[in-house]
Amino acid sequence: MKKEKIKETIDPKLSHTKESPEIQERNVINYIKDNLYYFIGGLAVVIVAVFLIIFTTGSSDKKEKQASLYLSRLYTYIDTQEYKTALDGDKSKTMRGEQIYGLTYIVNNYKGTKSGKLASVLAGNCYLKMNQPQKAIEYFEISLKGDDFNVLEGANAGLGCAYEMNQQIEKASEHYSKASEYAIDDENKARYLLFSAICLEQLKKVDLAKEDYTKVINLSPNSEYSDIAKANLSRLGIVID
């Protein structure tokens, strides 16, 4: 499955020689967070498209098909960043004579289905975008009970982000690392390991951070993540050619 590419190039200020290491690190962390939100949103839309194809055409389970149908009606709201409507549903419209139910309704009534687990990832992402990390954690946790690697990747990435917003850095690092394990391609594995390494540095676990930075370089040597990992290793006294 093709994943979203990072949306911006690194701000030139990140490598400006006149800035202190602390300011450079803060700039890197802010850059990473901005692109994580972007990535989770992009991943969510791609997963929705995949699940719609699977469940509206091939599932014989009545509850699964119902959940996926309700979910399909929210695609536009997610895509246009109408997060509250995506969560609560749209009472001003109907489709085929039915109310447009929101993500929270789907999770509450269909969380035992695969589409329900997907809805919980999307709900968690909406709460992240609305700057409500504690609510996001509640919904991402529901997603962890599934077995689809795409959903588990998104759930763990989201939990990492939410815990970091809550200043629970150790938990954030753990979930970023798990997201890397579930990611299919090396670039996304590197992405999450970079997030994990930045958290480990904040926890003063420098040796573990160095290990993750090195893994990032080996996994995706020509990516933005590798460039950041090399810069951070250099700041820690290790030079990578």
Image (cartoon, rainbow, N blue to C red):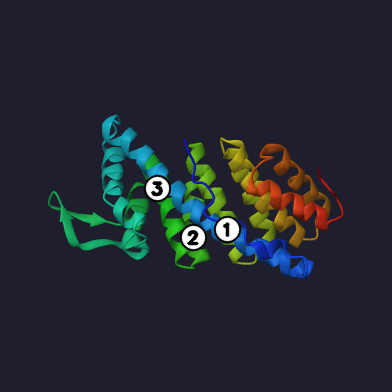
Q: Which of the two residues, 182 or 11, is positioned nearer the viewer here? A: 11
In the displayed structure, 55 sits above or below 142; it is above
- Find residue 79 and report its horizontal and vertical position in percent: 35, 54
Q: Mark 1 points at which residue?
A: 161
Q: Answer yes or no: is residue 112 visible.
A: no
In the displayed structure, 57 sits above or below 142; it is above
Give the foreground label among 1 and 2.
1
Question: Relative to residue 237, is residue 77 drawn left or right?
Answer: left
- Find residue 4 and report its horizontal and vertical position in percent: 49, 46
Q: What residue type is labelled 1?
A: Cys
The residue that appears at 35% across and 41% down in the rendered structure is 49
Crowd rating for badge 2 (residues with CA inside 10 Å; few <14, some 14–19, many 20+) = many
- Find residue 32 and report its horizontal and vertical position in percent: 61, 58
Query: Does dot 1 land on a helix, a strand or a loop?
Result: helix
Task: Evaluate if marks 3 and 2 touch, with contact meaning CB atoms under 8 Å apart.
Answer: no
Give the foreground label among 1 and 3.
3
Crowd rating for badge 3 (residues with CA inside 10 Å; few <14, some 14–19, many 20+) = some
Q: Mark 3 points at which residue?
A: 45
Q: Which amino acid does label 3 sit on?
A: Val
Tell me which numbered mark, 3 or 2, is placed earlier along the sequence. Answer: 3
Q: Answer yes or no: is residue 230 visible.
A: yes
Task: Evaluate if marks 1 and 2 touch, with contact meaning CB atoms under 8 Å apart.
Answer: yes
Q: Mark 2 points at which residue?
A: 136
Measure the alpha-carbon separation of dots 1 and 3: 18 Å
Q: Which of the two residues, 37 or 167, is positioned nearer the viewer here? A: 37
